[in-house]
Image (cartoon, rainbow, N blue to C red):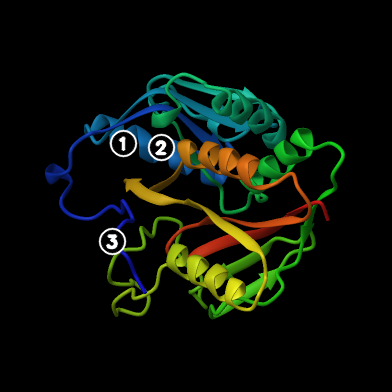
């Protein structure tokens, strides 16, 4: 089931070309966010990653990133004190409406964040079709993964791991926990799930999968261009009658899935 499109942190660092980004947005400035920021600082110092701007979003002005010393702060970093949904509502709207350099932008998600990208796509659909009801509904059937749990907001959490993974796991081809090959990949599993649902006669579009690829020094990122492309695809699909689409923010091993219904 595994594919070879991960962008994972494979091979000796000296053999990899420097990765260039426009804006990198870090979701949260707490324990996870501050870890990612420090790792990016190390990656930049080693010549592995370069960016135009590094933005950390946290509602707490006294978060861990705010307390980093000047030596720990990566170049071109700024801290935005704002709720995540409010920030992404503005930032993604600007990106979707033709923001400059969006093809090089990326988001570093937090393991504890809500399904922010699906929230934005649903809000965008509601703005686009104000006369229609846009709702989140539970998955019609569970996907075939070892661990899963339905959240109170309709988000379905899935994982191939039935154990606790470390924050710095880059999901390499050989699983550090099992010591065997990682013969699974959540993007592949989600696509297979949608194909199976359609075979049952369900009109489920997508999936719109935002893949968290591990880029350098244990830091995973989503490409903003994929989120913008999903918004454009939904605009072309929905608006007439009832339309369902599946949104997933996933890595190889874990994910959050959301079934969004336009015209519920």
Please identify the quadrant where the N terminus is shown.
bottom left
- Residue 188 image-quadrant placement: bottom left
First in sequence, mark 3 or 1: give its number. Answer: 3
First in sequence, mark 3 or 2: give its number. Answer: 3
Q: CA distance from mark 3 to mark 2?
A: 28 Å
- Residue 252 image-quadrant placement: bottom left
- Pair 3/1: label in front: 3
For mark 3, give the secondary structure.
loop
**Is the residue under label 1 in contact with that under label 2 (CB below 8 Å)?**
yes
User: What label does residue 11 carry, if any?
Assistant: none
Left or right? Give the position of 151 relative to 79.
right
> Is 201 rendered above or below residue 17?
below
- Which residue is drawn at the image coordinates 55% and 72% (left, top)? 193
Say few, some or many: other residues with alpha carbon within 10 Å of mark 1 (under 14 / 14 to 19 / 20 or more): some
- Which residue is drawn at the image coordinates 67% and 70% (left, top)? 202
User: What label does residue 38 carry, if any?
Assistant: 2
Q: Is 53 in front, or is 166?
A: 53
Which x, y percent locates residue 73?
Answer: 42, 26
Residue under circle 3? 4
Residue under circle 1? 42
Q: CA distance from mark 2 to mark 1?
A: 6 Å
């Amino acid at each position: 089931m595994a594919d070879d499109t991960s962008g994972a942190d494979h091979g000796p660092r000296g053999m990899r070309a420097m990765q260039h980004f426009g804006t990198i947005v870090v979701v949260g400035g707490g324990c996870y966010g501050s870890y990612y920021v420090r790792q990016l600082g190390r990656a930049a110092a080693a010549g592995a990653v370069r960016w135009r701007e590094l933005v950390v979003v946290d509602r707490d002005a006294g978060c861990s990133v705010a307390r980093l010393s000047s030596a720990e702060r990566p170049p071109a970093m700024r801290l935005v004190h704002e709720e995540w949904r409010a920030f992404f509502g503005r930032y993604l709207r600007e990106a979707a409406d033709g923001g400059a350099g969006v093809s090089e932008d990326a988001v570093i998600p937090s393991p504890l964040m809500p399904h922010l990208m699906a929230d934005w796509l649903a809000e965008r659909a509601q703005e686009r079709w104000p006369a229609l009801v846009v709702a989140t509904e539970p998955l019609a059937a569970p996907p075939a993964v070892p661990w899963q749990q339905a959240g109170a907001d309709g988000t379905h959490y899935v994982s191939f791991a039935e154990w606790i993974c470390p924050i710095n796991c880059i999901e390499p081809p050989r699983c550090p926990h099992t010591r065997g090959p990682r013969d699974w990949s959540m993007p592949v599993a989600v696509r297979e799930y949608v194909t199976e649902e359609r075979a049952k006669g369900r009109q489920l579009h997508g999936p719109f999968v935002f893949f968290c690829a591990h880029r350098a020094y244990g830091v995973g990122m989503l490409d903003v261009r994929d989120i913008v492309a999903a918004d454009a695809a939904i605009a072309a699909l929905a608006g007439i009658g009832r339309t369902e689409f599946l949104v997933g923010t996933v890595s190889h091993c874990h994910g959050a899935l959301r079934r969004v219904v336009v015209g519920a």
